[in-house]
Image (tube, rainbow, N blue to C red):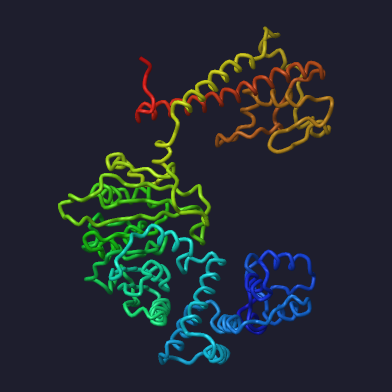
Amino acid sequence: MTDSAASSVGPLVTGSEIARLAGVTRAAVSNWRRRYDDFPAPAAGAANSPLYALAEVQEWLDKQRKGQEVSPEVELWQAMRAAYGEQMITGLAAVAAVLAGEPGPGLPDGVATRIQELARTEKPVDLSNGLTERFMDSARRAGSDQVTPERVVRAVCHFAPELPTDATVFDPACGIGVLLLSVASDVGMRCRGQEMDVDSARFAQLRADLLGRSGVRIVAGDSLRTDAWPDLKADLVVCDPPAGVTEWGREELLLDSRWELGVPSKAEGELAWLQHAYAHTEPGGQVLMVMPASAAYRKAGRRIRSELVRRGILRQVVALPPGTATSHALPVHLWCLRRPENPAGADTNHTVRMVDLTGNSPEGSLEPRPDQVADVSLIELLDDTVDLTPGSHLRSRHRDYPSEYAALRKELEDQIRRLAALLPELVAGGGPGSLDAATTSVADLARAGLVAYEGPEPVSASEQLDTDYLQGFLRNSVNARRSTSASGTYRLDGRGSRIPRMGIDDQRRYGSAFRALTAFEEGMRKVDELSRQLAEIARDGLATGALSPQE
């Protein structure tokens, strides 16, 4: 449905908003959609996130006696959706300006009317907070990265250091200010932020004003290209930078003094944001950076990671559970940095704490178990890859090498013993070529209805033909060459292949031998994999001291 068609049906609501209207769960609304043929059809939206006409929903709820009176806040939100569509940030900023008493462009009639009604009963700060929560909920359901997800905010707040009440906190990509104002929750803290999107920056500042946060200053602009706070040194810098952006200004910023740890490549925009954040810390100041998991091991960022480790700047890497970032299911990391107070580096760390929470629920505890934490020495990290992925370092520390080695060795020994028993007893036959005289093509067998295809391999479709016999002869070297294309791709295709003609009893005798050979080959593949695993754990165990040679 087009925007004009959608607007003609009035305000729209999502499934979760219908649940709020009716005072039920989202699951109940989903059940209604399936059970009731007269449930309103979607008026807009996508298949996985439909939107419904509010008027139709209210009429249906009333008819079913499931409805409740629509709250003025819901009516305001729907009026804003109808007026601003995808530009809800613009609408939020305009409404917040009116709530703060600032002059500005007039609001659409439907929005202005509802604001006036709500102003009689609601405090401006409560109304602003309610609209912010609705916007964040909408962004979460849509999988948008327009705002920092609540789970990421919770994680950053959990791992943030304790700060004095007069601390300075900075967010150079603050969006609508959710992360900045959540971490710096004390009213007396001095907060500074910058955001490229003008409406987001304006709304963030207006929110802070409505909250009575007089120490908050947020400006619009590109932090990397046009730093609005060049002299700012903060106690803590938090940042959830734009992900996957390659046009971050590398060419024009090649000689910038912020690249203290190395010039980031075009593909490593997150490492540019990280160094920008670090440049704004005072001695002893810290950085909490939301990073994609791939930044921990990508080849292009190796030099910068190496400098972070070598100088003792990197203090902790936390791998958060999959699902923490709403826009994708991949894990994200928190990188925790600290600027040494002593320029000579006397107070630098000699280890990096690795925390792996990827096995946890995104809604679960953020306090790691002992087996999810390891303090890794700098020398261990400074290898050819400088891999900062927590899981790769924790696995080696919490493995029971002696038990794993003993179990794998026993399994390998058992498998080798079974292999000898799998080999069929074979004796001399009639000699090479003795079965070539009387053969038939598989194509002829298929035309006669004796062969069928279930997947890539032909199988017997008759009691007159044994499947193992058929497939065994198709896999011999002559037929294999017939089934191999000019590019070297093998596909078991019997159209050009031929098999000997023999009675069903002889077929079964040959089929049994072929079946045993197939099992033998599968056993050999298992032995090969076990051998690889056994050699790897033995080598790593010897290298770490978990295993030692017998005296």
Q: Provide residue 392's location: percent of width, then percent of height.
A: 41, 41
- Where is residue 258, by image quadrant? bottom left
If the image is split into quadrants, where does the C terminus sit? top left
Q: Return the residue nearer the eye: 118 or 418.
A: 118
Q: Residue 500 versus residue 97: which sits nearer the camera?
A: 97
13 lies left or right of 329: right
| Number of residue marks | 0
Image quadrant containing the N terminus: bottom right
Residue at image position (70%, 17%) is: 513
- Which of 326 and 257 lies nearest the eye of the viewer? 326
The residue most toward the left is 344
Extreme residue toward the top, this view: 428
Does residue 219 lie above or below 97 as drawn? Answer: above
Residue 467 lies, with reference to residue 360, above or below; the image says: above
Residue 56 percent location from the top left of the image: 72, 80
Q: Is residue 229 toward the left or the right of residue 428 in the image?
A: left
| Residue at the far front in the pictured view | 165
Which residue is depicted at the point 61% across and 28% down? 481
**At which x and y percent is residue 484?**
60, 32
The quadrant where residue 387 appears: top left
Seen at 21% across and 62% down, the residue is 257
- Horizontal side of 280 relative to 409 (left or right) equals left
Give residue 91's position: percent from left, percent from top. Answer: 49, 82
| Figure quadrant of residue 121 | bottom right
